[in-house]
Amino acid sequence: MFGATVPDGLEAPTAPRRRTGAGLDGLAVADGLDRGDTLAMMRSGELGSVHSWELVTAVDGPGTRLTVFLSGCPLRCLYCHNPDTLAMRDGEPVTADELLARVRRYLPVFRATHGGLTLSGGEVLQQPAFAARILRGAKEMGVHTALDTSGFLGRNLTDTMLRDTDLVLLDVKSGDPETYLRVTKRPLQPTLDLGRRLAASGLPDGVTADAPVEVWVRFVLVPGLTDDERNVGLVARYVAELEEIRPGTVGRVEVLPFHQMGRDKWSALGRDYALADTEPPSPELTERVREQFRSHGLTTY
């Protein structure tokens, strides 16, 4: 783990700067349930399909984070580096109580590093009842909470879940609808709608007025796919719009250079990887894109 000391007795799968997790080490899997019980517990949020978890610093939110990757995602991103989380069956059944017990074990780490819990995926909002139960339990412990989401299933984010969320890592994969469709096989509009809802929720009459949700926007820079100046400009103007709705909404923009860390996973799964020959962006291209965001007054990394 980078930059923090884990107290004795806390077995933590340490991670480099990515991805996906270190499996389910330390989490008990809820084996032996029949299909009916499994479905009932998933509907109530008592049970979720969990792919993996990891403990990282300076990734997925402030401080040291317990990042939990849930299985299932409606998007089919060309550059997905977690293709092994796309289906619900890719995960294992884990109860909310079991996961919250793991969160409790790391309370000293979170307090020492001003960290917390991040729910990621896959797409966390594909399991809203489970996510809601985890968020509520974490907040009852005083833990900082974050959701990493594409926003496509933003309609599943209830007002109650919003009140239990401190930070949303919103992946805005493109500003141009046609490019977004090409990248994800899904429409852009739900993502835009969620961002605006997050900004409005912290207004004086909003559902989180007393504790506004912060947003970190993430943009994956893929040469030949998302790097077009017009496309980047559309994303930047959208993010600036969120700041106009509620100043302080967007804590930062993270421009994430494309990498090939997921290529072997695609091959192992027997799937065609359309970007196998795509090179990571040059430092010059990456800086140009970051400057496009900065030109709108946005703090950008």
Image (spheres, grey):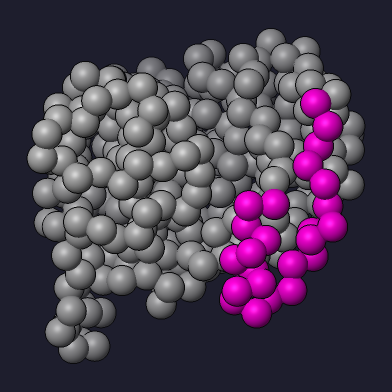
Residue 76 or residue 31, whichever sits in front:
31
Find residue 171 and report its image quarter.
top right
- The reply, left or right, for residue 36 in relation to residue 282 is left
Q: Is residue 5 visible?
A: yes
Towards the viewer: 98 or 253: 98
Q: In this rendering, would 270 be left or right of 73? A: right
In the image, taking residue 234 as reference, residue 298 lies left or right, namely: left
Q: What is the count of numbered marks?
A: 0
Rendering quarter of residue 27: bottom left
User: Where residue 136 sits in the image (x, y, percent)?
Assistant: 19, 43
Reply yes or no: does residue 16 show up in magenta.
no
Q: Position of residue 2 (x, y in %)?
A: 38, 28
From the viewer's side, name the closer residue of 229 and 58: 58
Q: Is residue 201 above or below residue 92?
A: above
Quadrant of the drawing holding the C terminus:
top right
Quarter containing the N terminus = top left
| Residue 206 seen in render | no
Q: Quadrant of residue 201?
A: top left
- The image position of residue 119, as x and y in percent, is 37, 47
Name above or below for residue 46 compared with residue 55: below
Residue 191 in the figure: left or right of residue 215 = right
Q: Tell me the residue at 14%/30% (across/down).
A: 7
Main secondary structure along the magenta-highlighted residues: loop
Please report the residue visible at 53 percent of the width from the left and 13 percent of the height from the top.
Answer: 247
Furthest-front residue in view?
8
Q: Which residues are magenta?
A: 260-283
